Amino acid sequence: MKTYFIGADVHCTNTELAVENNGNIVQRFSVPTTIKAISEVLNNISGKKLLTFEEGPMAGWLYRNLKDKVHEIIVCDPRRNKLIAFDGDKDDRIDSSKLAALLRGKFLRNVYHSDDEEKVELKRWVGLYHDRVVEATRYINRIRAQARLYGIKIPSKVIRNLEPRQIWLSSLENKELSGRLSVFWMGLDVATQQKDEAKRRMQILARKYDILKYWSELPGVGTVRSITLFAYLDIPWRFKSKSKLWKYCGVGLIRETSGKDNKGRDKPARLQLTWYANKRLKNVVIGAATSAIMSSGDNIFRKDYESFIKNGMTKSNARHAVARKMLTIMWGMWKSNSRFDSKLC
């Protein structure tokens, strides 16, 4: 049976497909970016079919709808496809051909996508919630900055409470400033309402997963952080080792070494945090570790932090060490679907 390597250069309206066999492009197709049109092309190719396209806004949608049409599908990381980015001429037909060549050579790195449509919807609600939180924060910063132009400090109770806000605005002598602040506050109120609705919807979708209840019981974690971690990681078996999980969440260490010393020996390797990570998950994990460390109650994470500091570790390194331990514990709880047992630590 012949093996066909199919590269697809996907755009919002049109998709270019190049079919390669034995190093030669045997067919080309230009079709609308619809599941029906692309499926028809794939169904007309007989033999073993391997399909690849780059990660993008439509990658998850294409992956879930086309994975049953081919023997293997790889959603690849465009940042690693240097051949497409820097080599020779560039257009959609050429890009699809190069993708097929990279697929045949096994040079592509797969980008993970969930098979579970319900979890995908949960992830989108979680993303919307965090986006609205950021937007609300921006409005607050703009409101404070606008007032500072006139040397005015806004009381904290005025920011989110409607009645004190109206009284405070009416007390301003500069009515033009009052008018501009009112416009900004309209945006803040809308962003806050959207944030609350997104939170409500994601909590409804998360009710069916018991592990989220168990995670929420851990010091510093809470409901929103639990749901965010769950939605973005998808399944516990996604990572082969805890070090890969740490790196993806931004708390893992990588070893770097380069050059030689004056005696020709290799310089000592340096350990540093990986920069290539999911920033949202990094904020969740570091935030949870910080909250656990700062909590007034007695907990295992705070004890570990104090022990690390006592042994000479810097505060930053100690915080990241606690974050790695917390993440490892949550990973183990997820795989066994059980509550935290401090006796096992």
Image (spheres, rainbow, N blue to C red):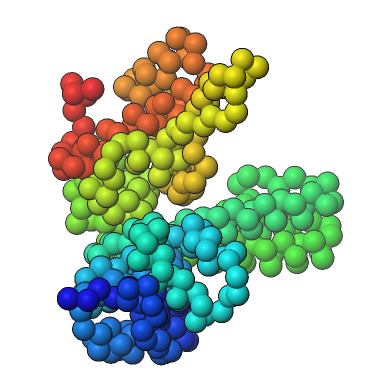
Q: Is residue 52 above or below residue 204?
A: below
Residue at coordinates 77% horizontally, 55% vertically from top-left?
146
Residue pictured at 18% horizontal, 28% vertical:
341
Visible residue check, residue 2: yes
Left of 46 or right of it: where is 224?
right
Q: Which residue shows up at 29% across the image and 75% down it?
A: 4
Identify which residue, 217 or 231, lies in the foreground: 231
Q: Position of residue 128 (x, y in %)?
A: 45, 63
Q: Residue 190, located in which quarter of the rendered image? A: bottom right
Q: Nearer the viewer, residue 112 or 122?
A: 112
Question: In this figure, what is the number of numbered marks?
Answer: 0
**Residue 38, image x, y percentages:** 33, 85
- Check the image and name the residue furthest to the top: 311
Is the C terminus in the top left, top right, bottom left or bottom right quadrant? top left
Q: Position of residue 73 (x, y in %)?
A: 29, 68
Q: Residue at x 52, y 32 (%)?
A: 256
Query: Looking at the image, which is closer to me, 73 or 120?
Result: 73
Establish if 256 lies above or below 133.
above
Q: Nearer the viewer, residue 21 or 149?
A: 21
Q: Position of residue 202 (x, y in %)?
A: 33, 60
Residue 192 against residue 7 in the figure, above or below:
above
Query: 51 above or below 326?
Result: below
On-image quarter of the N terminus: bottom left
